[in-house]
Structure formats: structure tokens, C-alpha cells
Amino acid sequence: MGEQEKVNILMVDDQPGKLVTYEAILSELEENLIKARSGKEALDHLLRTDIAVVLMDVSMLELDGFELADMIRQHPRFQKVAIIFISAVHLTDIDRLNAYQRGAVDYIAVPIVPELLRAKVRVFADLHRKTRQLEMLNRDLRSLSARLLAMQDEERRRIARDLHDGIGPLIAALSMNNGMLAQQTKKLGPEVAEVLQQNSQLVEQLSKETRTISHLLHPPLLDEIGLLPAIKMFAEGFAERSSVKVAVELSPDIGRLPPNVEISIFRIVQECLTNVYRHSGSKTAQIKISHTPDKLLSVQVCDEGKGMAGGNGASTHSGSSHGVGLSGMRERLRELGGTLEIKSGVNGTTVIAAVPVNKTMTKSI
Amino acid sequence: MRTRFLIVDDSELVRKSLRTVLQANPEWEICGEAPDGETGVRLFKELHPNIVILDFQMPGINGIETARRISEIAPAVPIVLFTQHASTDLEKHAKEAGVRSVVSKTNAFPMVGMIEALLGPTDSGPAAGDSGNSAKGQAE
């Protein structure tokens, strides 16, 4: 079995002799074998240890196997534990059905064929091991994706700052120098004056484009004066560039939020508007941000476009036709403990993000 | 007495260009320059300028916070926010903090006329033909 991590197999029987037999049969699997002589002892083990397979006798005096299975299944943590019943009696189809309805994965009749029991337990032990690995990989993937998003935000912020600190002053100086020269046009002659005017226009254009790039990378108002002005400014710029008319309805009592919440909400709105422009065909969009009575911050972006492929909710998990947009939004919201809901139909799409916001963490600017 | 300007901007290049533009008017002088808001507030208290030109995005406190602190000290002194990020919303916040006017760095040309208007006809330099009047709005 090599380097594989061992899983725990719980054997439950009120007859010690049978437990020894199971142990002898299963020892070859080289997993951790745990013995319990009663239902209560079995529950104690389940609570303390991560159990892959429970092997139990149906007929036990104190608490029979079926009752124990019911108790195990009631606990959400144990919903996925594989339960294998062993029984010398109760061997009718009704009995078996009864066991499967209680969540058993197998029902083995006595006399036990050792190879058969071993093979069955091995399948579920391996399945448990793989599920655990998958869960671990999923956790890693989630944390990696959260880190990637955070790094992307940081990188965008850095480039925007470089543009602001490096190119911004050069443009401002050029603009001021041109202004100085423009005051001397009488001395310049008409041709030079015209070139100067063209230069001034070029500088203005250069400045506008640099500013757009910088603002798309990282909104300057977000850090300095907060989410709402940053969203308004972004919406104004977006409307100008895209010809999509954007209505913004922001509840004024939102105040400042923690930086990670502000940047995430901003990016979600940005992504939604980009989707409106690229995919919806809508000529209008509406952004609404407000507190809900259940202490959530609700962020809604609606359009009147053609709706998303797959319709209502169906495409909310894939996001394949929308780049990484939707999955990115989901990841951001998961990090904040929030949710994403998408309503889409022929009359348009509404994206609703809900973020838990503790009122005490907001402060006014 | 000439009109005395305090320039607060983290870019040396912008400060230099502003100096050139403003000093073209013989009635105007730069009494101090600061690379950040905190230093700006300190120099404001020391130098009592008649007008302040402020950048918005700077290390430490931003231009709006700097304006708020300066206007608490001397509300009559005009403050001009000189920024790459001029927008309606920024202007609203800036005015609440005591800024008189917001000028875009991307189109700095109208700035001189705007400053002249802010200072009033008596301080508008040689164009008004009056160089003898002392500056108004002294810092307390």
C-alpha cells in the first residue's frame, strides 16, 4: 500500500470474538482498525476520529445496528461515512432494503467470506482517501485562486500607481509648458501657434488615455475617498466609453468598508458592467448598492439585454462563455462569506451579490 | 506685497512646472513647497501663504485631508486641488473639505485665469495694473 495515508475503519460488535475475527480479516489492508463493543462506544469514536468505514453487526443487544445507523446519519458530519452491515439473521430483501434506506453501502451475510469483506472495505477505504485528497486539493485551489485575485489586485494597483507617479507628472508638466507657450502665441507666428495647439490637444488625448488605463487598473478614489465615489466615477467613464447608459443608485449610509471588501465589490461591479457591454447587447445598466435588513450589503447590477446562455441560474456555475468573470466574482464573494445570485431571461440579467457587513466596521469618510 | 503660494505635490517635476507657470506673473511668488500633506500643513502654519495649490494623491494624507486641516486653520485662504483625477464626485468631496477649486492636471492651461479669479481683481497681477495691494486671506 506504499506511502498512502491510512484511513480509520471502525468495527462495531458487542461480541469481542467477532471483533477479533474482523480484525484478522482486515489487518491485511494495513489501515487503522478501531474496535467498538457498543453503539455508544462507536459514536464516541466517530466524534473523535475521522472514520472512513463503519462495519457493524445488525444484532446488538443495547443499540442495534439500524438504530446506530440512524443516529450516525443524523449528524451532518457523518453523512458520508460508509456503513457496512453484517448479519447472520434478518437476511430478507426487506431487511436489506431497510439497511440501504438507513444509508448503508452494503449488507453482508454471515458466514463471511474474508476475501469478499476485505475487497468491499478496501473499495470504501480508497474512496474515502480519494475524497479526502480531493477536498484538500479543492481547499488548496480555492486558497490559490484567492491569492491570485489578491495578487492581481495588488499588481494592478502598483501599475496604476506607477502610471500616476511616473507618467502623470510628465504629462502635467507638458500641459503646463504648452499653456505657458500658448500665452506667447503672438510671438510665435500662426504656423507655430497651430502646431502648439495641436500639441496641446495631443497631450490632452495622451493624458485622457493614460488616465483611463490607470482608472481601469485601479480606481484612485477607492483608496482615498471610498467605494461609492469610485463606483460613480467608474460608471461615468464606462458610460462615456461604451455608450451604455448607466443609472447608479447608491445608499449614502454605506461609508467606508474594509479595503478587501471595497476592492472586491468594485471589481464585481466592474466585471458586471464589462459583461453588460460585451455580452448582453443592452443599452442600459443599473447599479444599486444598499444595506438589507439582515445586515448584508446588496450589490445589484441589472441590464435589459438578451440574457445569458443557459438562462436562469443554469450558467451561473460555469462562466465559460463569460471568461473567468463569474468564477472570479464567486471566489471574491466566497472569501468575504457572501453569495452570488444571477437571474437571467429574455428581458435581461440581474446579478445580485450579497456581502455580510458588520455595521461597526463601516465608518464615514 | 506679492501673493504668496504654497505648493504641495509629491512630484518634483510638477512643482517645478508650477513654479515656472506661476512665477511668470511678477506679482506672484512661491513661498514654500512640500512633497506631502503633513509637511504642507506644517509649512502653511509657518509661512502664512495667501493661496495653496494641492495635489490629491500623495504619500501619507491625501489632498482632501490636507485641505481639511488647512481650512480649519485658515478658512479664508483659497485652496486649489490640482489633480489627475478630477471628477464630479472628487470635486464634491474636495469642496466639503474647504477646497475652492479643482483643476485637472491634464489640462492645466485654465489654471492661471482661475487663480486670478480666486484671488480677486486686486491681486490679479500686472494685467489689472495694480501691484501695490497686499495679499488677502492671511493665515492666522
Image: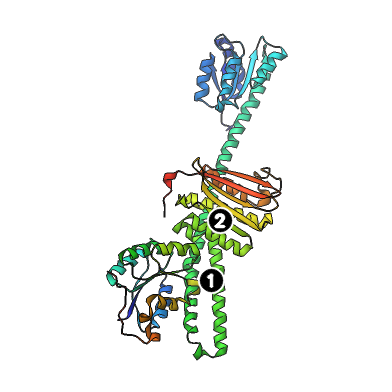
Q: Cα distance, mark 1 to mark 2?
A: 26 Å
- Disc with the residue nearer the chain's start (1 vs 2): 1
A345 to the left or right of A263: right
Q: Nearer the viewer, residue B134 or A46?
A: B134
In the picture, the disc for residue A207 is 1
Mark 1 secondary-structure assignment? helix
Percent coordinates x, y for residue A162 in the rendering: 49, 64
Q: Nearer the viewer, residue A291 or A192?
A: A291
Percent coordinates x, y for residue A3 in the rendering: 57, 33
B128 to the left or right of A9: left
Q: Amino acid at mark 2?
A: Val
Q: Nearer the viewer, residue A225 or B138?
A: B138
Residue A317 vs A73, above or below: the answer is: below
Residue B47 vs A218, above or below: the answer is: below
Q: Residue at x 51, y 53 (%)?
A: A263
Residue carrying label 2: A248
A88 to the left or right of A333: right
Q: Amino acid at mark 1?
A: Ser
Q: Could you confirm whether marks 1 and 2 are on the same chain?
A: yes
Q: Identify the image quadrant of the C terminus of chain B.
A: bottom left
Residue B58 visible in the displayed image: no
